[in-house]
Image (tube, rainbow, N blue to C red):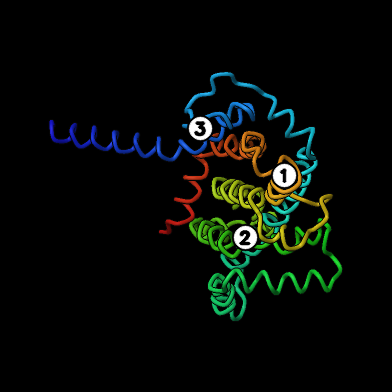
Amino acid sequence: MKKRNLTKAITYIFLSLWALIVLFPFYWMVITSLKSYSAYNSEFVPSLIARNPTLENYVNAFTQVPLGRYLVNTLIFTVITTVIMVIVGVLAAFAFARLKFRGKNLVFALFLSLMMLPNELVVITNYVTITNAGLRNSFPGLILPSVMSVFYVYLLKENFEMVPDNLYLAAKVDGTSDMKYLLRVLVPICRPTVITIIILKVIECWNAYVWPRLITDDPEYFLVSNGIQELRENGFGRENIPAMMAAVVVISVPLIVLFLLFRNKIMEGVLRGGTKG
């Protein structure tokens, strides 16, 4: 009993220390954003507290640079991309999990092999395709290459296959169409996994940097990720670290809140999607 309590105590101490290490960068970012430019530059040794906190940096984040526009662009990109990805991913996963057609296993193996391709190779081919189609500096150019994810389709397929075949056969006997079975049976049963891929896709879109940076050079279509670089180069300047931290806090808070609200669903969906039998 004493040995078990000691092990538990050591585990909690280790986890607490690890949590402090993980959370410290965010704490430092928030504290720095609350310091004035002069106060920050006058610190010979960086202070862990803001002695005279100010919200001036947050005001500047929305007045000196178009941070609001970047947030709206990112919201549009994230919502449309996620909706299309969910529709396409659910249909593809259902086809691989329940429908029977010649060469299904081979097609799925080839589809799964796409995960082995280097991201740089995909970026290059997508860039050439979107450029030749004249879609640079547009939302379709931003969205189209991001609407499919092999991993999310695989996760959904594994989850769909966990549902007993008897439900599908009973639905077919009752004359239920495949689409109605998918929407009224499979998706409700596998809701945790669907919610998981939605949240993960939202985070992925919100943090997208390489592709938006390549395909857009018009500030009208900048997302928050490549907008940060614009803030650094042409907004606050490289020296105004507190203002930069304020902008980063504004950008980070929506994702942190989203994760905190749905963290249990994420873990449940990943565990269910990765466990079969």
Instruction: Look at mark 3 in the image and give the residue it sits on.
Output: 27
Horizontally, residue 34 falls left or right of residue 44, namely right
Badge number at residue 12? none
Q: Amino acid at mark 3?
A: Tyr
- Residues at marks 2 and 3 touching, judged by CB atoms closer than 8 Å: no
Give the residue type that dot 1 points to: Leu
Q: Nearer the viewer, mark 1 or mark 2?
A: 1
Decide: is 142 above or below 42: below
Q: Position of residue 72 (x, y in %)?
A: 78, 42
**Disc with the residue nearer the chain's start (1 vs 2):** 2
| Mark closest to the chain's N terminus, 2 or 3 | 3
Element type where label 3 sits in the image:
helix
Task: Identify the element where label 2 is drawn.
Answer: helix
> Tag 1: Cα neighbours inside 10 Å, few (<14), some, or many (≥20)?
many
Percent of width and height locating residue 92: 64, 64
* Nearer to me, 255 or 186: 255
Residue 104 location, quadrant: bottom right
The residue carrying mark 2 is: 173
* Mark 1 lies on residue: 231
Residue at the image point whose x is 82% and y is 63% from the top:
136
Where residue 178 sits: x, y (%)?
67, 60
Please state which of residues 188 and 131 is positioned toward the viewer in this rendering. Answer: 131
272 or 130, which is in the foreground? 130
* x 69%, y 73%: residue: 124
The earlier-in-sequence mark between 1 and 3 is 3
The answer for how far apart the CA atoms under marks 1 and 3 are is 21 Å
Q: Quadrant of the N terminus?
A: top left
- Residue lying furthest top in this view? 52
